[in-house]
Image: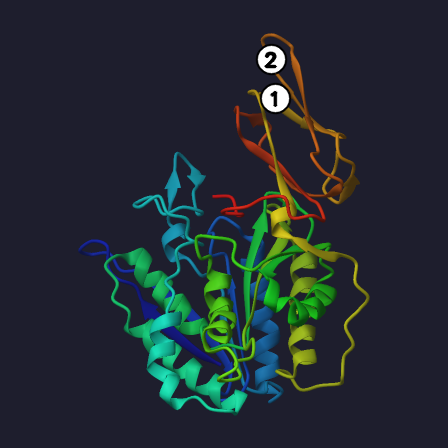
Amino acid sequence: MQVLHHPLLSPAPGTQRELVSLHYGTPGGPKAYIQASLHADELPGMLVAHHLRQRLEALDAAGRIRGEIVLVPMANPVGLSQHLLHAHLGRFDLTTGENFNRHYPEQTEAVAREVEPLLGADAQHNVRVLRQALKRAVLAAPVDTELQSLRRTLLGLSCDADVVLDLHCDAQAVMHLYTETPCWPACEPLARFLGARLTLLAQESGDSPFDEACSQVWWKWAQHFGERFPIPQACLSVTVELRGATDVTHELAAQDARNILDFLQWRGLIAGEPLTPPAAVGDARPLAGSMPIKADAAGVLTFLKQVGDEVRAGEVLAHVIDPVSAQVHELKSPVDGLFFARDFLRFAYAGMRVAKVAGREALRTGKLLGA
């Protein structure tokens, strides 16, 4: 294993944060990149990374890693240090207000112009040329802030990988995944290995989250070059939602780490006996069919349904109770679907998103992800 330290742009004299990456195997072959807790207050991924690290060290020592596996066990030192009145605030940068998982820069057009004279009829040659140029462009991009330098560092480590797994969690949720629609054929076995109840698909969800910044360049290059040059979808990038924020147990983390490594072994990055993906326990649905449930009034929030329940349109999911007037507001599902996530706060303000139901039809447009 090789440990690399990546200093971030200093935000003030006397202050210097760094990102740490762990590298297993040998660069030059297939590559997988795994990072934990880009939203720094989402902790299940950090524990999964702890278990991955132990297993990867043993696999590396045994010479079983084919290619390179990069693990970033804590992807956001900026957000990890943000506390206000004893509360950890790791989702948004307190300086800019920006979500740490949004606004990753895109190099699609610039790289396409640079490499076009070098492309040809060999798809794998094209992949190598594009990856090399993409990495150069990412690492050469200027940055003005610590947040921008964090984004550049993370993309620099991941943009040339075959597989990118971004480990997150929701508030209270079932295991579910987000990926781009062109990635679904490659993602479907991962969903099986992880036991995901749901995979949410979008061609482009808006605001350039980390996972899409890694994968979207490939389908965009394929559209740009058309039939002139073969460009495969060379990166499977997935946001893995490891259930809820309090699902931080060794039992779950060890299981998730084992399932991730089984998937990488199935992909050929780890030597061993041939594996078969287990039976699917969920399915894929459009992200545009994931419907937010909003409180239409303020009050005490109590749920009548549990995450993982299949619900019908019009079915009451929760009550919001005004403690002064005793008025009870019913929050109903707008669609038939899977009740897959809900908030852990139990006092709702008017307009607060408190839950999500995944339907099967694309009903929403515009930016599909919440803040």
Residue at the extreme top of the image, as rendered: 325
Q: Amino acid at mark 2?
A: Pro
Percent position of residue 143, x then y: 26, 63
Answer whether residue 135 is visible to the viewer in this image.
no
Which residue in the rendered view is the most extreme toward the right?
279
User: What residue appears at the point 65 percent right and 72 percent down from the top-left corner?
Assistant: 186
Q: Is 292 in front, or is 224?
A: 224
- Total tally of numbered discs in the picture: 2
Pointer 2 with pointer 1, Cβ within 8 A: yes
| Residue at horizontal 34 percent and vertical 78 percent from the top | 113
Would you call the spot at circle 1 few (<14 residues within 10 Å), some (14-19), or many (20 or more)? some
Q: Which residue is mark 1?
A: 300
Residue 167 is left or right of residue 332, and the answer is left
Is 65 situated above or below 144?
Answer: below
Inspect the image, locate mark 1, and give the three-letter code of the amino acid beneath it. Answer: Val
Task: From the viewer's perspective, tell me whether residue 220 is left or right of residue 47.
Answer: left
Point out the tag, 2 or 1, that comes first from the N-terminus.
1
In this picture, is 198 found above or below 370? Answer: below
Can you identify the residue that label 2 sits on?
323
Q: Is residue 134 left or right of residue 248?
A: left
Decide which of 351, 88 is in the foreground and name it. 351
| Residue 216 drawn above or below residue 198 | below
Q: Residues within 10 Å of mark 2 (few under 14, many from 20)?
A: few
